[in-house]
Image (cartoon, rainbow, N blue to C red):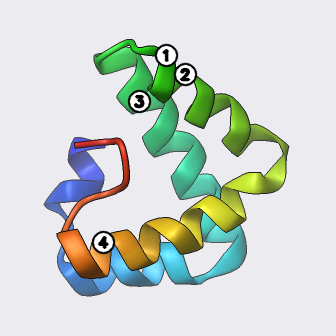
Amino acid sequence: MKWFNKQSRLIQILLLLIPFVNWVTELVVRWTAFLEKPGIIRLILAIIAIPGLGIIMGWIDLIWVLLFNHLAFAK
């Protein structure tokens, strides 16, 4: 999660815009966020990202990053 937040806004948007890259990014960021700060919401989001719903979550996060400059539920 810290690595993602250190990237430029353009790199963050590109990582979340490309479908397969977006899914891998979601998996890494969500599980890292859960391991750093365990919580039920972070666990649920990490589990949801596994079966491929991470692509949809990535597009939601793309919009969230554009609006609020961080991932949803990962601040």
Q: Residue at x 81, y 53 (%)?
A: 52
Q: Which mark is residue 74?
A: none
Q: In which image quadrant can residue 27 be found?
A: top right
Looking at numbered disc 4 in the image, what kind of residue is underneath it? Val
Residue placed under numbered mark 3 in the picture = 32
Cα separation between marks 3 and 2: 10 Å
Q: Is residue 24 above or below residue 46?
A: below
Disc 1: which residue: 40
Q: Which residue is mark 2?
A: 43
* Snapshot quadrant of residue 67: bottom left
Which amino acid type corresponds to the residue marked 1 in the rendered image? Ile
- Label 4 crowd (10 A; few <14 / some 14-19 / many >=20): some
Q: Secondary structure at mark 4?
A: helix
Q: CA distance from mark 3 to mark 1?
A: 14 Å
Q: Position of residue 15 (x, y in %)?
A: 47, 74
Eyeballing the image, is 17 above or below 45?
A: below
Q: Position of residue 8 (x, y in %)?
A: 17, 76
Quadrant of res 43: top right
Q: Nearer the viewer, mark 3 or mark 2?
A: 2
Asked if the residue under mark 4 is in contact with the one under mark 3, i.e. CB atoms within 8 Å, the reply is no
Query: Circles 2 and 1: CB distance less than 8 Å?
Result: yes
Q: Quadrant of the C terminus?
A: top left
Residue underneath mark 4: 65
Q: Sort mark 1 into few (<14), some (14-19) or many (20+) by Cα contacts within 10 Å.
A: few
The mark that comes first in sequence, 3 or 4, is 3
Horizontally, is 55 left or right of 30 in the view?
right
**Label whose residue precedes the other's in the sequence (3 or 2):** 3
Location of residue 11 in the rendering, given as x and y in whole percent from the top left corner: 32, 79
Q: Nearer the viewer, residue 40 or 33?
A: 40
